[in-house]
Amino acid sequence: MEGVTQEQVITVLIGAIIALFIGYFIGRRGAPGSAENRKLQSELDSLRDERARYEQRVNTHFAETAGKLNALTENYREVYEQIAEGAAALCSSGSGARFDALAAPTSEDDTGDTIEGSSVQVEPPRDYAPKSSPDEPGVLNERFGIDGADVPPDGAKASP
């Protein structure tokens, strides 16, 4: 072994490392299921690309829709202001005021988002069924018309 030089040892080591790399890659290609793994990876990549394109289409759609809705809102406001101005100028003094009440709130006026409590009337549902006495159930009673003794408001017999 005296005749072995350092260059020969390095050459053998480099050859062994190269052979290991080549063997590793050949082994991976020839291993069972490697073709299926590549196919699944390809499908996964294509599905990811498809999902990314879909998300982009959704984002674009909603961005365009938001822009069109903003334009529609602005056009509606302009038409409404035109009608309100025309009503104020052309109608008698009391008729044009109804359009002003619905006008878009200005920056100084913050009352556009609130409803006054005095303008809301809350009542329970009324039972308008004709009754011969206050003790009889009306049409809103859950027993009305079930036993056949109660008569509906139009005088016809109750259906079972």
Image (cartoon, helix red, strand yellow):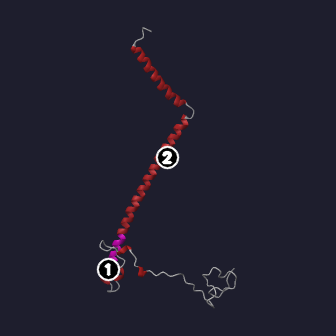
Q: Can you say whether 68 is above or below 128 in the image?
A: above
Residue at x-position 38% and y-position 73%? 113
Query: Can you say which quadrant of the picture contains the C terminus?
Result: bottom right
Pinpoint residue 121: horizontal percent, then vertical percent. Answer: 46, 82
Q: Residue furthest bottom?
A: 132
Which mark is on residue 61? Answer: none
Q: Can you say whether 153 is above or below 20 in the image?
A: below
Pinpoint residue 36: horizontal percent, then vertical percent. Answer: 55, 37
Residue at x-position 42% and y-position 11%? 4
Pinpoint residue 109: horizontal percent, then vertical percent. Answer: 31, 74
Which mark is on residue 47? Answer: 2
Query: Can you say which quadrant of the picture contains the N terminus?
Result: top left
Residue at x-position 65% and y-position 88%? 155
- Looking at the rendered structure, the secondary structure element under dot 1 is helix
Does residue 80 belong to the magenta stretch? yes
Q: Specify start and end residues of the magenta stretch as a single range.
A: 75-87
